[in-house]
Amino acid sequence: MLRFDLPQVPSNVIRWEAFVTTVMCSLALLVSPWFMLVPAAQGLIKGFLGHTKCPAHVVWRKIFTARNWLGRMEDAGAKMFAAKVLFLASSVSLLLYVGGSTLWQVPAGVLVVFSTLEWALSFCAGCWAYGLWYRRFPPG
């Protein structure tokens, strides 16, 4: 379902944010699970409030605009759904860590894989799932 009520988001900024997510999740796996707080916070803000409310997105967008690196504009609805998935997976990872389970590494590792697919190949698994959902269960 396209979200015409939200401004579109630039693809290269989204890909850069996916790269940052990959780095944060990799640091969580290699250094400290507390690095998962960054993707959880970004997923919360971008997924539920919108990309324009996320301070990191605003900063990256300004930098990319100044250098004319924005790329094509994409629907924000699918990217917001993907950000909600990011929030959910990051939160699950943190909760498992706080609970003393080593299974926290599973959602962190999955996020490394899927965020790498986004920044390296521009394949958004969350966007794909979003499209599949709305083809299977169209609104109204």
Image (cartoon, helix red, strand yellow):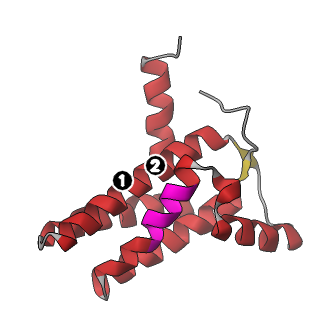
Name the residue nearer the viewer: 73 or 62.
62
In the rendered image, residue 104, in percent from the top left (x then y), is placed at: 21, 68
Residue density around tag 2, few if under 14, some if 14–19, many if 20 or more, within 10 Å = many
Q: Main secondary structure of the magenta part?
A: helix
Name the residue at 46% across, 62% down: 115
The image quarter in which residue 53 lies? bottom right
Q: Circles 2 and 1: CB distance less than 8 Å?
A: yes
The magenta span reads: 38-45
Residue 8 appears left or right of 135? right
Q: Secondary structure at mark 1?
A: helix
The image quarter in which residue 61 lies? bottom right
- Which dot marks residue 53? none
Question: Given the image, on which type of amino acid does mark 2 rest?
Answer: Lys
Farthest residue in the left direction?
Answer: 101
Farthest residue in the top direction?
Answer: 140
The image quarter in which residue 4 lies? top right
Question: Given the image, on which type of amino acid does mark 1 rest?
Answer: Leu
Q: Which residue is mark 2?
A: 84
Does residue 39 belong to the magenta stretch? yes
In the rendered image, residue 39, in percent from the top left (x then y), is placed at: 46, 67
Residue 39 appears left or right of 33? right
